[in-house]
Image (tube, helix red, strand yellow):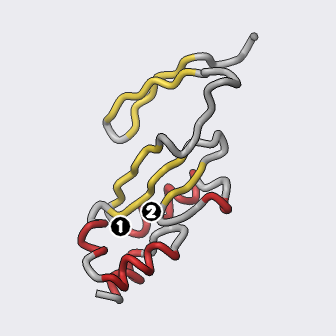
Amino acid sequence: MEGKVITAEFTLGGHQYIALDGGPVFRFNEAISITILCDDQAEIDYFWYKLSFVPEAEQCGWAKDQFGLSWQIIPANMGALQTKPAQIQAMMQMKKIIIQDLVDLA
């Protein structure tokens, strides 16, 4: 089919990826996701704005893009933001991670 991309190579965050159109048999699902570790809220907001396309599929920093690929858009220090049960519970209720909300619960 003219104009259809079958294979694409790209670099994201210094890592190389190859994407292959597997046709209708092989579709994206939650079994695979790409994690973006963000340094601050502005970076989280930037990637969330660019990648969030299916709001009903969002939870705990996971967003789904227009192609159905899942992305984990989380703070690089996520482990430090989940040291208290209240922080974990709050994070589970979030769609996009709000760093300050988790810091406030520490």
Q: Quadrant of residue 72?
A: bottom left
Spatial separation of the CA atoms under disc 2 and disc 1: 7 Å
Q: Is residue 90 above or below residue 56?
A: below
Query: Can you identify the residue that label 1 sits on?
Result: 40
Q: Residue at x 39, y 61 (%)?
A: 74
Q: Is residue 2 above or below residue 68?
A: above
Q: Residue at x 43, y 67 (%)?
A: 42
Per the image, label 2 sits on a secondary structure element best described as: helix
Q: Position of residue 58 (x, y in %)?
A: 58, 61
As drawn, is 94 to the left or to the right of 78?
right
Q: Position of residue 28 (x, y in %)?
A: 59, 36
Give the amino acid at mark 2: Ile
Q: Quadrant of residue 41?
A: bottom left
Query: Can you identify the residue that label 2 sits on?
Result: 44
Give the amino acid at mark 1: Asp
Per the image, label 1 sits on a secondary structure element best described as: loop
As drawn, is 11 to the left or to the right of 69?
left
**Do the residues bearing badges 2 and 1 touch, measured as CB atoms within 8 Å?**
yes
Q: Residue at x 31, y 36 (%)?
A: 14
Number of other residues with Cα within 10 Å of mark 1, as a class: few under 14, some 14 to 19, many 20 or more = some
